[in-house]
Image (spheres, helix red, strand yellow):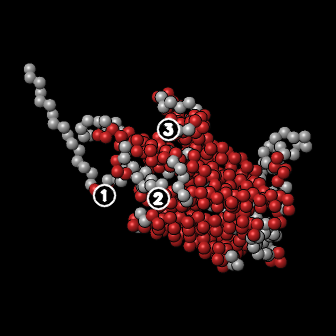
Amino acid sequence: MANPAKPAAVRAPEPPAELVREPLVLNNRPLGWITDAIAGVCEKPMPVWWWPAFIVSFGGMVTMFSLIAYLVSTGVGVWGLNQPADWAWDITNFVFWIGIGHAGTLISAVLFLLRQKWRTSVNRAAEAMTIFAVACAGIFPVFHTGRVWFALLPGYLFPAPNANEIWPQFRSPLLWDVFAVSTYGTVSLLFWYVGLIPDLATLRDRAKGWLRRFLYGIFSLGWTGSNRHWSNYEKAYLLLAGLSTPLVLSVHSIVSFDFAVSVVPGWHTTIFPPYFVAGAIFSGFGMVLTLLIPLRSLFKLEDVITLRHVELMCKVLLATGSIVGYAYGMEFFIAWYGGSPYELYAFKNRAFGPYWWSYWAMISCNVISPHFFWFKKLRTSVVFVWIVSIFVNIGMWFERFVIIVTSLHRDYLPSSWGYFTPSWVDVMTFVGSFGLFMTLFLLFIRFLPVIAISEVKGVTPQADPHHPLGGAKGHH
């Protein structure tokens, strides 16, 4: 019996143009080009602009630590804190920096679990930003306590057996902060480091000098790229992503409890945890865009950090900015509906009291500016996106300032009302914290791959065995 004729290959129709997505790596770049482009950032000498940027940032960091030494030697009175506003710039800056640190874990953990492949080009820098922001955040509440040398004693911050049997107050949300922030920082550092291991091995194998080869060799933990190593790596990465995801929600929720569990009008509200989490993601993505948009241009990484990445992050900003705007409106509704004259006055005072300028700056930056991203033309304009991202960062700082200072400076007793004005030490300490942040970030660019090489390769057509460029025969 003759063999039946072989059926003709069935070719699937091409999708319509409006459904075709822009690739995550442009121009069909080969895998070798990706390695050279990303590893070359830290292998080649730094560009001319890097040194002035590093010197200015390092100077800011030294200024901050000098002012902290001045504060410890003189007293917390060198800050502008007063009665009744005994929380002000210090706690504002703490909450601001913790919020900045949220985008890294969200991009790395939550989007990884949701299988969002676009995260691969931005997750490494966002994770590094998380760790550096948490380091900046931890400075302010510790030194706010005044006699900071007691922080070295067991039982002052962390519970530890001690001769005096003095234990921290476990019912205080300030102690919850200690556990939440330290856990978040530790897990974020582990998550960042585990993701770095394959790329550290790549840098080890490419290193020219013996010192670089030796150091990259130590931190790459003997990585060879074997199947066993990749299997263990993926399990560890998945577990850390699963651990990090609830931390994204819990850390800023616990930070919000610093305010929500109090009885201060303007703070005592159950909307704070989801509102703070959305605001943290909002400010974190704003900072990611602020840092990565110049970086992609300065290091010629437009083929890896594409307009599609920028546009998707703009959509996240639009979504979280809308949630934050809804929360602002809902706060006024709750104050009115609750029937408490003190609560209602606190919100009227925010909008029309002595600090009206900070409230409307917050509304302009956080509520109005993200809505420009409804328009694709503006979402894909890199310069416009960068400017809006800076406004988002400014607006989110003002949000924390409005929540903290305007709720405290006028209490139940009009005779004790006051007006908080920051001292020069307040201002320069905050500016110096940006110096610390940028010093760490510039060193990260100098010595480590700013983009996850192995993860970016995994989303290229060459990594797909069913794609013609991945070795498959014919069309599928």
Residue 130 image offset from top left, x and y in percent: 60, 51
- The residue under label 3 is which amino acid type? Arg
Tell me the tag on residue 206: 3
Question: For the residues marked 3 and 2, what is the alpha-carbon distance in whole angstroms?
Answer: 25 Å
Tell me the tag on residue 18: 1
Query: Most extreme residue toward the right, as rendered?
Result: 164
The foreground one among 249 and 53 is 53
Quick one: label 1, few (<14), some, or many (20+) residues within 10 Å? few
Residue 54: in sight, yes or no?
A: yes
**How many numbered dots are placed on residues in this image?**
3
Residue 267: in sight, yes or no?
A: no
- The residue under label 2 is which amino acid type? Ser
Depth check, mark 3 against mark 2: the one in front is 3
Residue 393 image offset from top left, x and y in percent: 58, 64
Q: Earlier in the sequence, mark 3 or mark 2?
A: 3
Tell me the tag on residue 188: none
Residue 311 image offset from top left, x and y in percent: 43, 59
SS class of the residue under badge 3? helix
Q: What residue is at 61 percent from the left and 65 percent from the top?
A: 396
Q: Quadrant of the C terminus?
A: top left
Question: Which residue has dot 2 on it?
Answer: 297
Quadrant in the rendering for residue 82: bottom right
Is 145 left or right of 284, judged from the image as shown? right
Quick one: label 3, few (<14), some, or many (20+) residues within 10 Å? some
